[in-house]
Amino acid sequence: MLKKLLWGILAIGIIGGAFGYYKYVRIMSPNVPERLENNIVIIPTNSSFNDVVEILNKNNQIIDTVSFREVSEMMNYKKSIMRAGRYIITPSWSNRSLISHLRSGEQETVNLVLTHGWLVSDVASKASRFIESDSIDLMNLFQDKEYITKFEYTPETLMSLFIPNTYEFYWDTNEKEFFERMIKEHSRFWNSGDRLAKAKKIGLTTQEVYTLASIVEREISKDKEKKRVAGLYLNRIRIGMKLDADPTAKFATRDFKATRVLYKHIRFDSPYNTYLHRGLPPGPISMASITSIDAVLNSEEHNFYYMCVDPNNLGYHLFAETITEHNKNAKKYHRWLDNIQKKTKK
């Protein structure tokens, strides 16, 4: 009897040990491939547990889905709605390591790069490449007048919110989180470097500074000239002279690819066309770089009111105080242009 009892205990021990080893293997053995081709896991918002398993399996990021499911149950990872995010995983991770990481919410950030665009739709398109919110959701928010008015923006001035830079975001950022982060970055930008005081000194609001900077941005390719050109436009504004800025005519007609501004552009009736209307347009015609914004805030003081392309130094301009002097510069440029066209025809 005792012998049978001992054999029974031994059998139970062996079975228990085998079961324990089985569980240990399921939990602790590598289940992420050693040769991992893609170490980024993206789990969209409102994903189910089955969605997560499918994503990992489709991306060849787990070897055995059955053990992953078992250990997920054991570790209480399985939920009706799973934690979203963008995660980096490591080759040869066990189920335990992988699940602990996904459950922790320790996301890898993305660098969201905002660069120069003409329209807020360009901002939406660029932002949507880096965060979960798509361009349609972003544009719907940008066009929500009731929402943006709370932050003292209008559809015309909204572009002045966006300061071109590289920002760290979590991938599962939604459109409102993106917008409100931009509000904070905008405030941080304007409250540094005495920018608010400088804007007040030249008699412009921050939105007006940005609007003028957007014209400088699209007018001038050389950073060295931006302060001088900003000063020229400010001179024109002070005496009530029209800005006659080519980029505003392009924006008005939405002919962004035009290499030369023609009569049809400058006669196009739009409040943005500074060939027809005095002062600044209703809002920015483009995203403005930090260099252009600071060029307006630190504009060069001079008596120039006119400029044209310098044919002897392409990319730069000839500046003049009087229309007579400007006409002489313009003749030089047009002679050069005529010669180029003649050579092209040959």
Image (spheres, helix red, strand yellow):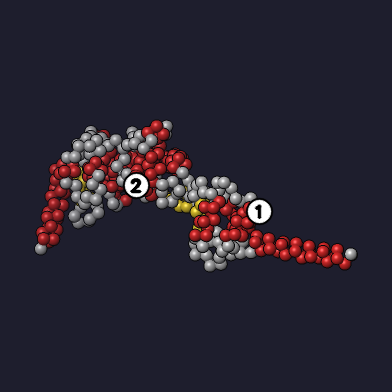
Q: For the residues labelled 1 and 2, say whether their Cβ atoms are less than 8 Å apart.
A: no
Relative to the observer, which residue lies in front, 17 or 93?
17
- Name the residue rendered at 62%, 54% in the picture: 72
Relative to the observer, which residue lies in front, 211 or 297?
211
- Name the residue rendered at 19%, 56% in the picture: 312
Q: Residues within 10 Å of mark 2 (few under 14, many from 20)?
A: some
Q: In the rendered view, does 345 fall on the left or right side of 271?
A: left
Percent coordinates x, y for residue 30 in the rendering: 61, 64
Q: Residues within 10 Å of mark 1 (few under 14, many from 20)?
A: few
Quadrant in which the N terminus appears: bottom right
Please state which of the two labelled residues, at mark 1 or mark 2, is closer to the viewer.
Answer: 1
- Name the residue rendered at 55%, 48% in the picture: 82
Real-space Cα separation, disc 1 to disc 2, in angstroms: 46 Å
Residue type at tag 2: Asp
> Does 34 appear above or below 46?
below
Quadrant in which the C terminus appears: bottom left
Percent coordinates x, y for residue 154 in the rendering: 35, 34
Residue 122 is tagged as: 2
User: Considering the numbered disc 1 on the image, is that residue within a helix, a strand or a loop?
Assistant: helix
- Name the residue rendered at 31%, 46% in the picture: 118
Residue type at tag 1: Met
Which residue is label 1 attached to? 74
> Does 323 appear above or below 152?
below
Q: In the rendered view, does 257 fall on the left or right side of 155?
A: left
Relative to the observer, which residue lies in front, 165 or 122?
122
User: Considering the numbered disc 2 on the image, is that residue within a helix, a strand or a loop?
Assistant: helix
Percent coordinates x, y for residue 3 in the rendering: 87, 67
